[in-house]
Structures are given as structure tokens and as C-alpha cells.
Image (cartoon, helix red, strand yellow):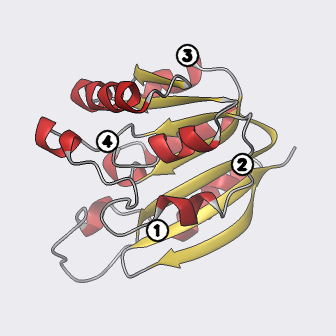
Amino acid sequence: MASTDSSTTENVNWHTFNDRIDPHSLISLIPIHRSQNVIVIGASPEGLAIPIAKYVYDGKLTALDEDQTVLEALSVEMSRLNLTNITPLNLSDDEVAAKNDYVDGAVLADVLCATSGQKKMLTRIARQVRKGGWMLVIDWIPVERITDHGPARSYRVDPQKVMRWASEVNMIPITRRILGSSHYVHVYRKHD
């Protein structure tokens, strides 16, 4: 999961995600509604938790991260912005399914490349999404060359694998995009 320090928290820029991706353009791709219950894996205040929590102002958002300092930074931003619909939780991916109820939507942004159990993470989160719900997956495009940013090639997940794993848990793709030269995005809807 993404980590942060206090200097990063003080200079949060809400108009970018990972310094390259506009969170509002991602939100426009998902079938999200203001009263939904959403789970976001990766709770960095620079990521998608805050923009999505603002969008689901009549709902609630559970932000999960394994790094306690990230959760603390999110709590500081929540207080500063007077956001009361976010619940930050420190959980490992093994505990995700056991500790949360069914959700209307789920977001996995740059987390598959950061976990050793990539298929396990995706399928556990997908199983938490109720019928008709959605899942947004954003991750790094696998590349053959060495890059100056992002995870090593060996950690990047092929988007075809993501599609196969999602289909195994009744997630039907509703959109697939390439974002710049570094990320792919998939949006799925749960079908049973």
C-alpha cells in the first residue's frame, strides 16, 4: 500500500492521483451514487479515498491500508476537511473479507502490484461487492523496459489476468482504458 510522511500530508494536491491521474476522471467511469457504501484499498490521502468520500456524501467509505502512518495521515485530512463518512481501518488483505459487510463498490488503485497475493486480493474484494455493484481496478501497465517510476516489471499485473480473475467471481467488464503510458483502468459490474 502507498505510504506517506508528514511533509507529504501538508501539501496534498486533490486534483491529481499519483501525480499523473485526475481522480474525477476516474470517478466519471464508475456507476457510483451519492448514498453508496464503498471500500477503497489503499488509504493514502493523495489517492482516491478523499475524492470518492466527497462523492458518496450520503453514503460511507471504508479506507483500508496496512500502513498505520498512512491511516493517520488520512485521519488528519478527514479532520481538516470535516469529512465524517470515512472509516480508516488497518487491515491485512487476509482480514479484508472477514471484517467488512457487502459493499456497493470497491476500488483497488495501485495495490495489486504491492501485494504478493494479487489474485487472492482481487477475488476477496470482488466477493464483497453486492450483486449489481461495481469494482474499479487501476494498476501499472507491465512494461519490458526499466522505468524511472512505478514498481518493477515482476510486480506489475497483466490486465488480461485481472480480467480473467474478475470473471471467475462474476465481475463483468463495463469499461477498460489505458491512462497515459503508465496505468490501465478496468471497471466491472457484479453479475450473479
How far apart in space, not on screen, are marks 3 and 4 (Cα)?
18 Å
In the displayed structure, would residue 33 be above or below residue 88? below
Read off the residue under disc 1: 158
Q: Residue at x 70, y 30 (%)?
A: 58
User: Within 10 angstroms of label 4, few (less than 14), some, or many (20 or more) residues?
Assistant: some
How far apart in space, not on screen, are marks 4 and 2 (Cα)?
24 Å
Instruction: Give the left or right position of residue 4, taking residue 58 as reference.
Output: left
- Pick whichever, 29 or 114, lies toward us: 29
Name the secondary structure under disc 1: loop
> Residue 66's mark?
none
Dividing the picture into quadrants, the one containing residue 105 is top right
Q: Quadrant of the N terminus?
A: top left
Q: Going by the picture, which residue comes out furthest to the top?
A: 99
How far apart in space, not on screen, are marks 1 and 3 (Cα)?
29 Å
Read off the residue under disc 2: 32
Q: Which callout, 3 or 2, points to the residue nearer the camera?
A: 2
